Every structure is written in structure tokens, then in C-alpha cells.
Amino acid sequence: MANEPRSVRAICPFYQRIRRLETHRAEIICEGAVPGMENVVTFRGTAQMEDWMAQYCETFTYERCPYAKLISEVYLRGDDE
């Protein structure tokens, strides 16, 4: 299935896109912790993905997300090179 472009609702700067899979699964694709890498979080259903997005990706407290927290720490340490 096709990737969906950046959501206008996503606030997290690490969010890149979502992908809905044929098996009713869904994925959120985020910036990876190292250059050239992406982080893919796979959900068993679109409802779970939408709940995750509402809790993390679409809020100004996105750094509560375990993935955003990790990537932020990498940038703060300067490990992104």
C-alpha cells in the first residue's frame, strides 16, 4: 500500500509519514536515531496507530514518545553525525 505524506496534524518534528498495510496493520515512520535510518513502528490495527498519534505525534508534548525521546537525546549528545 502507498505511504501517506506528512500529516497536517503531526507536530512531532521526527514524524515522517504513515503507511496503511493491506492486512489492516498500520505503520508510523519516523526519523531514525542515526543518519540514513528510519524508525518504523508497526501497529496491529489502524485504531491503535491513531491512538498513538493522538497521544504522541499530534501533541506539543511529543517528547513523551519513547522514540522521540531517544532521537532528542541523540541530538543533545551530538551523536547524529
Image: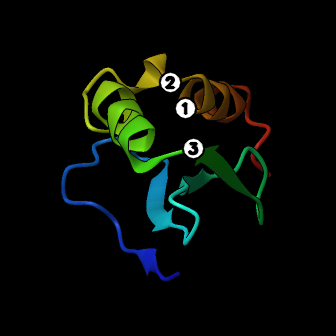
Q: Is residue 69 left or right of residue 80?
A: left
Residue 40 screen position, x and y as percent: 66, 52
Q: Residue at x 36, y 38 (%)?
A: 53
Q: Which residue is mark 2?
A: 65
Residue 68 shows which numbered tag? 1
What's the distance in space between the residues labelled 1 and 2, CA to CA?
A: 5 Å
Q: Upstream in the sequence, badge 3 or badge 1?
A: 3
What's the distance in space between the residues labelled 3 and 1, CA to CA?
A: 17 Å
Q: Is residue 42 left or right of residue 51?
A: right
Task: Look at label 2 and name its amino acid.
Answer: Cys
Q: Which residue is mark 3?
A: 43
Residue 55 screen position, x and y as percent: 33, 25
What's the distance in space between the residues labelled 3 and 2, CA to CA?
A: 15 Å
Label 1: element kind: helix
Q: Residues within 10 Å of mark 1 (few under 14, many from 20)?
A: many
Which of the 4 quarters of the picture holds residue 50?
A: top left
